[in-house]
Amino acid sequence: MKRFRMVLLALALLPLTARLISAQGGGGLKISAGIASFRMDDLKSLQKYILSTYPLQGKITSSFPPYTYTSIIYFRQLYDQVRVGGGYSFSTTGGKSSYADYSGRLITEMAATSHRLGAYVAYAVTGGDRLALSLYGTAEANLSSVTVESYYNILTYSNRLYNHYRSVSPTGTIGLEATYSFKSFALGIQAGYLVDLTGRLKNTDNGNELQDPDDPTHVLTSDWSGWIAQATVTIPLR
Amino acid sequence: MRSYRLFLMLILLWSGLPGCFFTDTSVYQTEPVAGDPPNLTVSTNLDTLVDPPVNDSLEVIYGIEVSGGKFYYMFADVGENPVFESDSSSGSFWIRSSLATTAGVDTLMLEIYYSTNTNTLADKVGYDANVEQFKYPVDFNLGGAK
């Protein structure tokens, strides 16, 4: 319930920031692309459990490694040092385990995506006409989507098992961004840490929660907490 | 000009979106080492008989042993007619005289499926099997007991 309220709060910040944005002049669009690490402890343990059910010793070839993190933010310059805005960000990662020999193959693929919508604020700590260093933060509502697909092809036999889970959780980011302004745009880099308060994963077909196979009282979550590093392009808009 | 540049940037961003999704094309490939082939032993109550007669019916008692492997399934047929099938490695079944249309010697065939011990995925999940056939002549005495 507490998490749900925080998601609502993050979403409620959107119209507020929109009002602030419309009240002031001068703004722009900030597009960022980069890489982020993700905790994903529960999904990593689920992946290990699935591997343990293989009839032969398989191998995890990827386990939720650092992967893409992109975002697009519309902002307004509220004061000389303060920018507020709102936007969308997206990140993805996944895992794969497999076993294959000349008689067939058994593969489990897990894919996780995160769609986040929320508010953005940045405070310029120092800077001149061209170079600026800012602290920034976001508060977002996060929709996680996790698919777990296992399939095999053994001799002439094949089968596939597919499950899709979703969760909603509040997330927040805090970080530093450095930008260098050119005549009509600005380039920058930013680094930060995202905290995900995690949401319980539910099956999209039947609504059942994804239980921990080792502890049925525990519901598995996706945890997007981790470090972020991005390159940014900022385009001023009139 | 500025809106054109912005539009171009958004198009570039959109076109790069599929590349953002996680992919892993690697597959863990192994070369399994095969174990010793399993040893199959089948015994029946017909082993010591020569052309046992089927007057009205004949009970066949069987036992199957697979050392160093797993027994999967067995089928019993007389000619083209299925008589019995089971996943039990021991048991019995009856051959009825109604199975034969003409009198004389016909063949009871036992078909045994058991593991290959190749240690492959197919072997471990039971999708790969050795098949061995055992034949026993039986004599159908149509028209009643002698």
Image (cartoon, coloured by chain):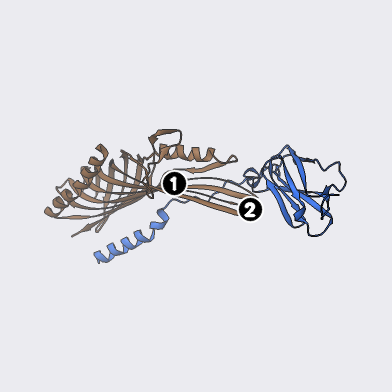
Chain colours: A brown, B blue
Pinpoint residue A133: horizontal percent, then vertical percent: 25, 43
Residue drawn at x 88%, y 46% is B50
Is A42 left, or right, of A156 in this rendering? left
- Is A17 situated left or right of A227 in this image? left
Asked whether residue A68 is in view, the answer is no
- Counting from the top left corner in percent of width and height, residue B115 is at 69, 43
Q: Earlier in the sequence, mark 1 or mark 2?
A: 1
Q: CA distance from mark 1 to mark 2?
A: 28 Å
Where the N terminus of chain B falls, by quadrant? bottom left
Please say if the residues under marks 1 and 2 sit with CB atoms less than 8 Å apart.
no
Could you say which is closer to the camera, residue B40 or residue B63?
B63
Dividing the picture into quadrants, the one containing residue A140 is top left
Residue A221 visible somewhere in the drawing: yes
Would you place residue A218 above or below residue B114 in this image? Answer: above
Residue sitting nearer the eye, B85 or B53: B53
Label 1: few (<14), some (14–19) or many (≥20) C-alpha neighbours in 10 Å: many
Percent of width and height locating residue A87: 25, 51
* Figure quadrant of residue A233: bottom left
Observer-side mark, 1 or 2, equals: 2
Label 2 resides on the chain identified as A
- Position of B65 with respect to A143 (left or right) is right
Q: For mark 1, what is the residue?
A: A94
Label 1: element kind? strand
